[in-house]
Image (cartoon, rainbow, N blue to C red):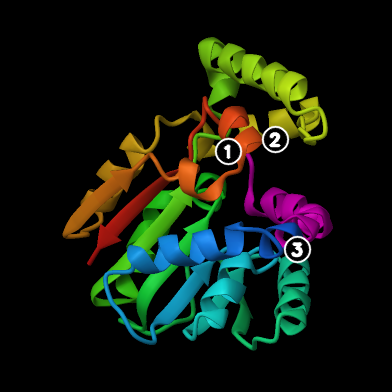
Amino acid sequence: MVNAENVIKNWTESSGNYSKLIERELASFKRQAWTELILANAGKSGKLKILDVGTGPGFFTIIMSMAGNDVTAIDCTQAMLDEAQNNAKRNGVSPRFLLSDTQETPFDDESFDLIISRNVAWTILDAEKAYAEWRRILRPDGRVLIFDANWNRRLFDENKNSEYLRDVEAVKRLYPDFQVNIHSSDMDEFRRTMPMCARIRPQWDLEALLRVGYSKVSCDTSIGKLIYDEPEQLLYKSSPMFLLIAEK
């Protein structure tokens, strides 16, 4: 079974590559697309106090700061936070960055209007504990927006893996200039040990969010058409990104 040290080591080693990825996103249509998608589902308007959980190199933190919000970002790896701070400075914003676990945060009860995360929940060792913690620090009528996908379900499902491999070949054929990143066997083995990767999602998440006390939960599985370009829509067809909305 994977432990916290393994997870931190993995994301520390990946920090530079992920930083290059969000530099490209910030320079593309995705900056505006993600900004509009988040704010449309925030449940509140005006200047929001936002927590970006697992910020990585800071994409959500930067775009929400650029939109005029009061943003705090946490990550479990200092290397990711260093990348995020540099990226924020280059983009002219000054959010707060803190080294923190996603399951136990240093914040007081009812601290935030909105909590956001992207591609984070699948990495959490005890997601139900994290969801309960996020509810604790959320203000009344606040929302949690979880953007994620069944990225690694194919490692446990032969049919899903076959679908994914067909999509990879189609992308290579139709979009030869698009770079498809294939995980090494060691990386696949690492992901097989992570609890969330074997679960049926977002069904598991919806049930867990209700168990820990959120008053209203919903899911949107159609957001890919808003935030992916054409090659990505094809590549991720078998593992579409979903948006989970949980209201306190």
- State the residue at coordinates (51%, 37%): 195
- State the residue at coordinates (37%, 80%): 112
For the residues marked 3 and 2, what is the alpha-carbon distance in whole angstroms? Answer: 27 Å
- Give me the disc on residue 194: 1
Q: Does residue 17 show up magenta in the picture?
A: yes
Q: Position of residue 67 (x, y in %)?
A: 50, 80
Query: What's the magenta bit mostly, secondary-structure-wise?
Result: helix
Q: Position of residue 46 (x, y in %)?
A: 34, 85
The local secondary structure at tag 2 comes to: helix
- Give me the disc on residue 190: 2
Relative to 34, residue 122 above or below:
above
- State the residue at coordinates (39%, 40%): 222
- The earlier-in-sequence mark between 3 and 2 is 3
- Residue 14 vs residue 106, the one in the foreground: 14
Image quarter of the N terminus: top right
For the residues marked 2 and 1, what is the alpha-carbon distance in whole angstroms? Answer: 7 Å
Camera-near label (3 vs 2) is: 3
Q: Is residue 126 among the parts visible in the rendering?
A: no
- Give me the disc on residue 66: none
